Image (cartoon, grey):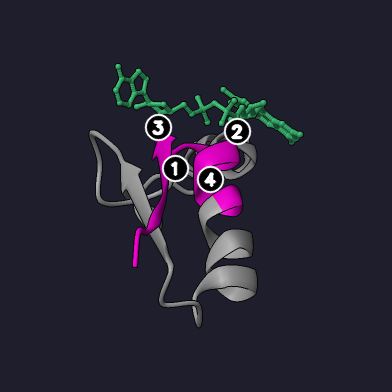
Amino acid sequence: MQKKRILILGGGFAGAYAARLLEKRLGHRADVELNLVSHENFVLFTPMLPKLRAAMWVSPTSCSL
Ligand SMILES: Cc1cc2nc3c(=O)[nH]c(=O)nc-3n(C[C@H](O)[C@H](O)[C@H](O)COP(=O)(O)OP(=O)(O)OC[C@H]3O[C@@H](n4cnc5c(N)ncnc54)[C@H](O)[C@@H]3O)c2cc1C
């Protein structure tokens, strides 16, 4: 059986969410192989960055990166 190979380049928002969705929809299929290529092994949740910075401003001792 020849597998269909899906390669997602980049593990940012688009890549991570595409991988999650495709895994959910196609993960059970033996004829599909899904791969994600990323520099990182984490997803940076960018909308949280300004809030984190603001929290550090208000209370620098109770919040660290
Ligand atoms: C501070 C901040 C706050 C934000 N707040 C919001 C918000 O509140 N709401 C909102 O909708 N958007 C927000 N955004 C914008 C949002 O983060 C971007 O729109 C979103 O991350 C874009 O997703 P993307 O997958 O296209 O790119 P990215 O998330 O940047 O992902 C690209 C990925 O590709 C990888 N990559 C690049 N080149 C290669 C390569 N050659 N090989 C392998 N991997 C590679 C990178 O390492 C990265 O992981 C914010 C952005 C910032 C910086």
Helix, strand or loop at mark 4: loop
Label 1 beta carbon within 8 A of ligand 1: yes
**Would you call the spot at circle 1 few (<14 residues within 10 Å), some (14-19), or many (20 or more)?**
few
Task: Kindly report which numbered mark, 2 or 3, lies closer to the viewer in this rendering.
Answer: 3
Q: Amino acid type of disc 4?
A: Phe
Label 3 beta carbon within 8 A of ligand 1: yes
List the residue tagged with mark 3. Answer: 10
List the residue tagged with mark 2. Answer: 50
Q: Distance between the residues labelled 4 and 1?
A: 4 Å
- 10 lies left or right of 26: left
Q: How far apart are marks 4 and 2 (CA)?
A: 11 Å
Q: Depth check: 52 or 59 in front? A: 52
Residue 45, which numbered label?
A: 4
Q: Amino acid type of disc 3?
A: Gly
Q: Position of residue 40 (x, y in %)?
A: 25, 41
Whether the magenta-drawn stretch holds residue 15 is answered as yes
List the residue tagged with mark 1. Answer: 44
Q: Who's the residue at 40% across and 44% down the image?
A: 60
